[in-house]
Each structure stands twice: as structure tokens, then as C-alpha cells.
Amino acid sequence: MLTSVLGSKEEAIISIVYSYGFSGFAAKLSESKAKKIAELPEVVCIRPSRTFKHLTTHSWDFLGVDNSEPSGLLRRANHGEDIIIGVIDSGVWPEAKSFSDEGYGPVPARWKGKCVPGEHFDVHNCNRKLIGARYYKGPGVTTELQKGDYLSARDSGYHGTHVASIAAGNNVSNVNVYQMTGLPVGAARGGAPRARIAVYNVCWAVDVCSESDTIKAVKDAIQDGVDVISISLGSQGYLLDTLKAVKNGIPVILAGGNDGPTPMTITNEAPWAITVAATTIDRSFPTVIALGDGQKLVGQSFYGNRTKNLELVAPNCPRRPLCSCSYETLEGINAKGKVVFCYDPYNSDGLSPTKTLHVAFSTVNDMGAKGLILAQHPFNQIGRLRPEFPCILVDFEIAQRISDYYLHSIRPSVKIKAAKYAIGQEVAPRVAAFSSRGPSARQPELLKPDIAAPGHAIIGAVRNKFVFLSGTSMAAPHVSGVVALLKVIHPDWSPAAIKSALVTTASVTDAYGMPLVAEGTPRKLADPFDFGGGQINPNKAVDPGLVYDMDPYNYGILNCDKVFVESEDTEDCRFKFNEPKHDLNLPSIALPNLKKKLTVTRTITNVAGDARVVYKAVIDSPAGVKMVVQPSTLVFNANAKVKTFNVTFTPIHSIQGIYRFGSLAWDDGVAHYVRIPIAVRTVINYSYADAS
């Protein structure tokens, strides 16, 4: 058949790519030859080969943690083989495919943990992937709080399961998130998919997590033999027992909190831990809004279907044409079966989009509306939506065009089309609006957060399906997965060295080389209080060149006394930092009260090899501050792997200032650029700082 068109048997054989037996074949053909073959009577049909987008967790591909490069982190680390990640959260749904042990070998011999049975959870729910499970119900967890939960390690909600699957979930194929028609089917996986998981359930009633239970879980995780501890819980303290984990060589990763974009809301500020901020990825869900006058505008949603032509209504607003949606403003409006339009650009309440979305959604849903178009400041909140109700987010520019149509139309109407799925059309990463920001009110001498990672609209397991969730809770397990991979390649690195490798290789630019942006009202160029060192760059962290290493005993000391609290014998501990705090060998420098010349000391270690290498200092001084590094050149070789240097800061102006930012990098001119963030605030009086 092909020979009659292609001229010879040999040319036909060369053209064949795949043979599908009696059903057909795939071949490389010119358009003209394809047309000739289509005309043959033996040919039923012929069509071009199509390409399909895979719906994956994508955040890992976005970070470059994939199988595309043989020398990449994922393949070099053998996908995190046999590293044990301890997830302290709300438990796990063990039947989720992310935790199947198919293809796994025996549990690592060093594992000393348990699979504690409980309500709807027995020892058979653990396996060679999910190797341990414990739960805790201390005196702070009342029967009322525990009501509706399983008294076991089983996750009655979603949080712990989602977090664990992000860090180390298996590669699960044929995933369709929310069963959305606009989304392709693909695979979902964790960052270290061959790592083992141990879960410690310390949370009840959705988000009530006892500190005493968490401390006990940390102690158990250390004794059980985990290699990494991931905690996506908010804490205003230091979780002092996490220092014990670090002293045992176990890196601890903590979520930074979801109270952004307000400054000074960062939590989990322990200097020995890795505190994580959340960023967006380059995935979007464009949704067409067709107005009755023919205009086609675009917002974003998860709505997987399409609506018929529906009436468009808006709330009653005294003294202005449009306003926000609430029970009060919608009173008297018949919203049932209609699409409600919420646009309130002049109300200060609109500056809290997370609150606005929740109130508007619940209100119009209760009233029987068939859809919601919500105008918002440029906060990406797509991860808070659900597919069953058409809630379309638009910015104020699109909202104004809808407003003009609505206010000048006799019978305004709208059609909402199904959301589509797009990758690469968003400027990313950006610091998510909800991500808590520094500086630390508790310890401003510690620059927090340390690092940023994807945390917005992240796909993860929830029971027997996959859903999108957002939060620094989702960002922290991204770092945990990367740390697990680094532990395979560098088993001798300390937690401090791993933290340094992540911070000093982080990126402060987006995929197009432009400075990172932090979402807020308004958006702004991101700074170290938004993202720490920057967006995590896993493949560069494997080979950082130099690290700011530190003996965990140098952080300070714990003074503990045995006390008797609520019928439990516990330890009441007070932490005392080594003084001065700014000389802790951290991969960052924060000076909240620079009144006169001050010198800071750091020590840096060459981990790139024994060959002679020369690094030169690259200084970006904070505005209004003179910064001098001595020595400004460091020479390393087989006999000189550790160097100490001083950084002297001198205020140029005698003012009660605000924080200014800079950086210090060590550049070998070839392969390594080791950068740390710097934050400095000048003061005149120590009694107050920025009291404006």
C-alpha cells in the first residue's frame, strides 16, 4: 500500500514509526503523501498525530525536579530511595494510591517506629511505603474537639494526607483533579516518590493541634529514626524539641504561616529550622465570560462545565452603583438561578480578598445563585475555589468592563464557559498573597522566612482523590521532598549545611529573569521578608560550592525543669540564644537596630572538592548603609576548606529608618555564586523602631 505512494519498499519501511498490527500504523509523511494515502480504498482514515498535555502536580516539574536530565537531582538521588520523612500533621488516609507499597523492598532496617492501631486504623494499614503511624490525644484535646474524628492516625480531614503526598507520594497515573472536563488526565507525584513516610497525627477538629502532642511527636520521630521532619503547623513558639532533632542530624522544615501579606506575621522562627514561604507556579485556569452584548472577557475558575444564558444581578448599594456581596447588600435581590456580580473598588474591605471571597461565595450560594463573578485585587486565589459552583475571579480592569455593561443594559445576561488548563502563561513564581511575611516580631535578629517554594493551588491526595489546596502548609513539604533528595546525595551534610545550600542557591528572579514579585495591595518587588533567600532551586542546591555550616550546639542552650502539668510529667524549657545573635553562622544577616558601626562574623566551608578555588565577594549594600567585607577574597584548597570573614556595617545617615535590603555573594567566576540575603534597619533610639 505505502510502496504505491512512496515509491519503494525501502522508503516505506523507513517512514514507519510504529506498527499497530492489523489496526494501523504511525509514519512520518509529508502533507502531500498523507493526502494520497488517505485516498487509497484500503485506508479507513488518516489524521495527524496529536500531543497531549499531562496534568501532573506540575510544581515539581516547575522546580526542575523531574526525570528529564540524567544528572538532575531526582535521578541522582534515585527518587529519594529509602529516606524516611516524618510528617507531623493530621494523620493520613492510608488507602490513597500515593501511599501504595507496590514495588517497594523491605522497610529500612534502621526504622524503629510503630504502626499504632486505633479507630478504623490497624497495623495492616501500614506497609512498606507508609512505614509508621502514631496518634496523640493529650490533655488539651477534649472529647468535644475529637468529636467526628477518628481516634487513630487516620486523617478524617485532608491536611495531613495532602502534605504527605506532596513530599513523598508515589507516582499516580490517570489523575483527573475534581473530574474537571477542561483538565487533561495525567500523573501526580511527590518530590521524593521513593522515600518512606511515617505520620504523626497531632491535630483534631480540623485545625486544633496541641503543642504538647507535637512535642511528643517530635521526640518519637527522633527515636523512630526518621531522616527528615516536615511540620505544616503554625506555632508562635520555637518548638524547642525540634532543636533536639537538628542535634540528631535531622533537618526540620516548618511552614511560615498564612497571614500575609501583612508584615511581621511570620511564624516558626526557630533559627535551626527551615521556615518556608509560599509562591505561585505558572499554571492558570482561564475561563471565558460571555456578556449579553457579545463581549468575551476572561477570568479564572475551576468550573468544569458551562452555563446557559443567565441573568446578571448585583447587590443593592446605598450611594454608589456597585458594592460587595453580603446578606445585607443582597437583601431584597432575587439571586436564585442568576449570576451575581460583586465589585467594590472603593470599599477598604476589598483590601482583604481572602475574607471577601469567603463571604461572597457563602452568601450567594445560600441564596441559590447559579454563579458568582467576583472582582478582586491582584491576589491569585484560584486554589480556594471548587469545581461544582461557577465562581469566576476577575481583576478590577475586567470588572470595570462588566460594570459598564451591567449599568447600561436593560436586561444584563452572561454565559460562563468551562475553565481551561494552561501552563506557561502566568508570570511565576510570585510570592503568594497569603504567605506570612517578616520581619519576626519575636526575634528580628533572625531573618525569616528562609526560603520560598510552591504553595498555591498544589495538587495532592485527599482520601481517594486529588485536589488543589493552597498554603505555606503545601510549600513546606516541597522543601521536605527536596531535603530528602539531598540527604541521599549528601548523607554527611548537617541540617545547617542543607539549609545553607537551599538559601544560597535560591533564585530571586522569575522564569523570564525578572525580579520576583510579591502579591499584595499593591503588588511589589519581593524582598527577603517575603521569600528569604528566594525561590528554592533544587538542582543548584546539590552543588552550592560553599555552605554556612554550624554545630547545632552553637544555637544556644535549653534550660529545662521538670514540672507537673495537667497530670502529665513534662518539661518546661526556656531557650537562651548564644550572644550576640547576629553572629550565629546563618546564611543570612538581619540587623534590626544599627545605630553605629557593627561587625558581623561568618564562617564558610568549601564542599565542592579539594582543588584550589578562589572566591571573590560581591557586595550589594542596603541603601543608606556602607558595607565592607574583610577579606574580600577567599582561597580554598585541600588544606584550607574553612574560612572566616567579617562584614562591617556603618550607617551613612543618622536616622530612625526602615528596613533596607541587600546581599552578599561569593563568586568563583565559574560555577558557584553563593548568595545570602541581608536586612538592615538604622535607628537613633533603641527604645522604638519604626513607630510611624
Image (cartoon, helix red, strand yellow):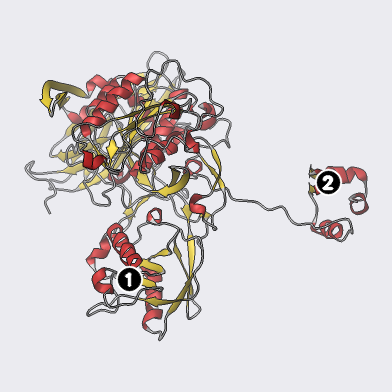
Q: In this view, does 531 lie to the left or right of 424?
A: left
Residue tagged 2: 22
Q: In which quadrant of the rendered image does the C terminus lie?
A: bottom left
Under circle 2, the secondary element is helix
Going 37% across and 41% down the picture, which residue do you hit?
A: 475
Is residue 32 in sight in this rendering? yes
Is residue 645 in sight in this rendering? no
Mark identifier at residue 343: 1
Using the image, determine if residue 265 lies above or below residue 673: below
Amino acid found under the numbered disc labelled 1: Tyr
Percent position of residue 334, x then y: 34, 77
Amino acid found under the numbered disc labelled 2: Phe
Instruction: Name the image quarter holding residue 250.
Output: top left
CA distance for labels 2 and 1: 60 Å
Using the image, determine if residue 299 lies above or below residue 227: below
Using the image, determine if residue 249 lies above or below residue 513: above
Going by the picture, which residue comes out furthest to the bottom?
410
Going 24% across and 64% down the picture, which residue do you hit?
A: 349
Q: How crowded is mark 2: few (under 14 residues within 10 Å), some or many (20 or more)?
A: few
Under circle 1, the secondary element is loop
The earlier-in-sequence mark between 2 and 1 is: 2
Q: Which of 185 and 608 is in front in this view?
A: 185
Mark identifier at residue 629: none
Percent position of residue 412, x then y: 42, 81
